[in-house]
Amino acid sequence: MATIYKILPASLWNAALSAGRFTGSEVDRRDGFIHFSLADQVAETAARHFAGERDLVIAAFDDAALGDVRYEPSRGGALFPHLYGTLDPARALWVKPLPLGPDDRHLVPDLAP
């Protein structure tokens, strides 16, 4: 078991909660899987793919509880978790805000449960 993290706009998270499922962001659907990060990848993912975005959340999940999670190479060959399937938001271990700091970089919360 590994804890993996999904960064997304709060509005998408709230829609997923209402629907009882998350089929992915526009980028996820285009790529054919839902993108996640490991703890040591979260800050770079936020900076690279969500720079300057407000109203984000980060949700933690147990990869073993999600189904078809594959660790595949991405940035510089690093392995990133990808979910092939639909995400059940009820499986989140926790959800926390991912605010912007005064320097417009995201303030990554403590990723412990």
Image (cartoon, grey):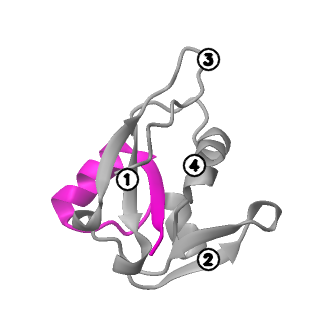
64 to 7, vertically: above or below? below
Confirm whether the magenta stretch covers residue 44: no
Instruction: Give the alpha-carbon distance from disc 2 to disc 3, as whole Å.
Output: 32 Å
Label 4: which secondary element:
helix
Instruction: Give the alpha-carbon distance from disc 1 to disc 3, as whole Å.
Output: 23 Å
Specify the amino acid type for callout 2: Tyr
Confirm whether the magenta stretch covers residue 9: yes
Q: Which residue is mark 2?
A: 71
8 to 107, vertically: above or below? below
First reached walking from the N terminus: tag 2 or tag 4:
4
Query: Which residue: 62% across, 52% down?
Result: 40
Instruction: Give the alpha-carbon distance from disc 2 to disc 4, as whole Å.
Output: 15 Å
Q: Nearer the viewer, residue 32 or 79?
A: 79
- Which mark is drawn over residue 59? 1
Label 2: which secondary element:
strand
First reached walking from the N terminus: tag 4 or tag 1:
4
**Which residues lie in the magenta part?**
1-25
106 to 85, vertically: above or below? above
Q: Which residue is mark 3?
A: 103
Q: Among all residues in the image, which is located at the extreme right?
A: 76
First reached walking from the N terminus: tag 1 or tag 3:
1
Query: Which residue: 22% across, 65% down?
Result: 90
Specify the amino acid type for callout 1: Ala
Specify the amino acid type for callout 3: Asp
Counting from the top left corner in percent of width and height, residue 105 is at: 60, 27
Counting from the top left corner in percent of width and height, residue 101 is at: 52, 20
